[in-house]
Image (cartoon, rainbow, N blue to C red):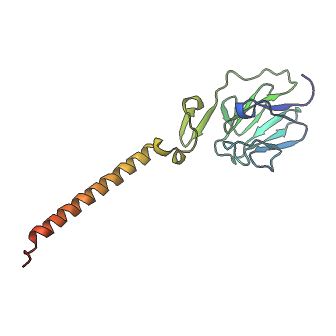
């Protein structure tokens, strides 16, 4: 491999999209203002940066602007120099860092995970990664509140029927 380092998207929906890295600093995010714009709703508007380091490679820097953080080879990072074949994960998108470095890759295996609230789940176990409020009846809290609402409604109707019955029984007969 010759030439400049590259960031190559591996995730299916954008697979093969390549960004050649020649500058000193690259903002990565969903915003069109970013030098590396990745249009995917799991990527924050301003997710992280790649900054050229003293060795001529790049360091991934996450200053806390992203919702789910930045990962390299599955590990959450705030600042880490990248080596050849490292997998950079921003949101649900995985990218491979490709450079001429002879340094061994630290990749053992890759697995895409998305952190939602305090729960980490494997992306392969869910068919819908939309927030819970967009999933309709799948949210257990929605089901609980719906059942409580129906219960209150039923009790109100029964209460009204009993009240009307008592009112009719206790009223004097019409003459």
Which of the 4 image quarters holds residue 15? top right
Furthest residue in direction front, as rendered: 175
Furthest residue in direction bottom, as rendered: 175
Answer with left or right where residue 104 lies relative to residue 157: right
- Residue plotted at (43% across, 46% down): 141
Q: Quadrant of the N terminus?
A: top right
Numbered marks: total:
0
Answer with left or right where residue 135 lies relative to residue 107: left
146 and 160: which one is in front?
160
105 and 32: which one is in front?
32
Answer with left or right where residue 137 lies relative to residue 28: left
Image location of residue 167, percent across then percent down: 14, 69
Image location of residue 42, percent across then percent down: 66, 42
Which of the 4 image quarters holds residue 158? bottom left
Image location of residue 107, percent across then percent down: 72, 23
22 and 139: which one is in front?
139
> In the image, is residue 78 above or below residue 101?
below
- Residue plotted at (43% across, 48% down): 142
Image location of residue 68, percent across then percent down: 64, 42
- Residue plotted at (49% across, 45% down): 136
Which of the 4 image quarters holds residue 112? top right
Q: Quadrant of the C terminus?
A: bottom left
Answer with left or right where residue 138 lies relative to residue 116: left
- Residue plotted at (68% across, 46% down): 66
> In the image, is residue 102 above or below residue 151?
above
């Amino acid at each position: 491999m010759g030439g400049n380092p590259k960031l190559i998207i591996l995730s299916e929906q954008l697979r093969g999209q390549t960004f050649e890295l020649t500058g000193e600093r690259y903002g990565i995010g969903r915003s069109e203002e970013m030098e590396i714009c990745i249009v995917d709703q799991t990527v924050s508007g301003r997710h992280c940066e790649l900054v050229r380091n003293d060795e001529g490679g790049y360091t991934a820097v996450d200053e806390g602007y992203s919702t789910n953080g930045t990962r390299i080879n599955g590990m959450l990072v705030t600042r880490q120099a990248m080596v050849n074949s490292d997998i950079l994960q921003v949101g649900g998108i995985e990218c491979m860092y490709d450079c001429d470095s002879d340094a061994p890759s630290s990749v053992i295996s890759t697995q895409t995970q998305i952190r939602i609230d305090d729960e980490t789940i494997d992306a392969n176990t869910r068919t819908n990664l939309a927030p819970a409020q967009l999933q309709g009846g799948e949210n257990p809290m929605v089901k609980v509140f719906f059942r409580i609402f129906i219960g209150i409604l039923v009790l109100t109707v029964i209460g009204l029927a009993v009240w009307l019955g008592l009112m009719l029984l206790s009223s004097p007969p019409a003459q």
